[in-house]
Amino acid sequence: MPGYTAKQITELLQREGADIHLRTVRYYTQIGMVPPLETVENKRVYTDNHLAHFRAILTLSKTGETLASIRKKLQALSMDEIKKIGKQMTLYQSENLITRETTKINDDAFITLSSNVPEQMKQEIVDSVSRIMKKNGER
């Protein structure tokens, strides 16, 4: 189990495209947004689980969630669910929001396509997925 310093966590997240500063990592730790640090060889360190929490926090904050609601949500989720949220972090980075469009099919399905995809093709994809979702919903 690797251990990270706050600076290393910040650098890792920044390399992944996150807009986060060392001060923010320490603040989130201080207010309990992430689990308590673990002790490895008499040092308090962050682990991969902490890194997953930070990714999830950054992802959820981009959706407009408040820190209080994010903390409640994360406390109620399993580690696998937290990791799943964190894996979506890149979808909410500004360059991806500019170059991609997301279309809601229904409450269960969203499609994200490059803005370079021709409009007619986008419509065909949306129609196809809509038919599949409708057909599966009728079973």
Image (cartoon, rainbow, N blue to C red):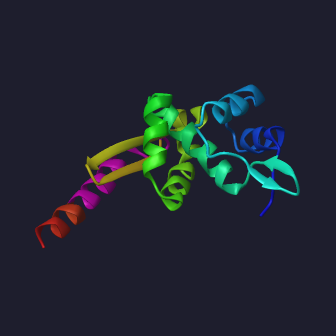
Q: Is residue 20 visible?
A: no
* Residue shown at the point (55%, 45%) measured from the top left: 56
Q: Position of residue 16 (x, y in %)?
A: 71, 44
- Dominant SS in magenta: helix
Q: Position of residue 86 (x, y in %)?
A: 56, 49
The foreground one among 92 and 81 is: 81
Q: Which residues are magenta?
A: 115-130
* Residue shown at the point (50%, 50%) measured from the top left: 85
- Image height check: is 7 above or below 81? above
Residue 5 found in image quarter:
top right
- Among all residues in the image, which is located at the extreme left? 138
Q: Is residue 75 visible?
A: yes
Q: Position of residue 41 (x, y in %)?
A: 88, 57
Quarter of the image with the N terminus in it: bottom right
Residue 107 is one of the magenta-drawn residues: no
Quarter of the image with the C terminus in it: bottom left
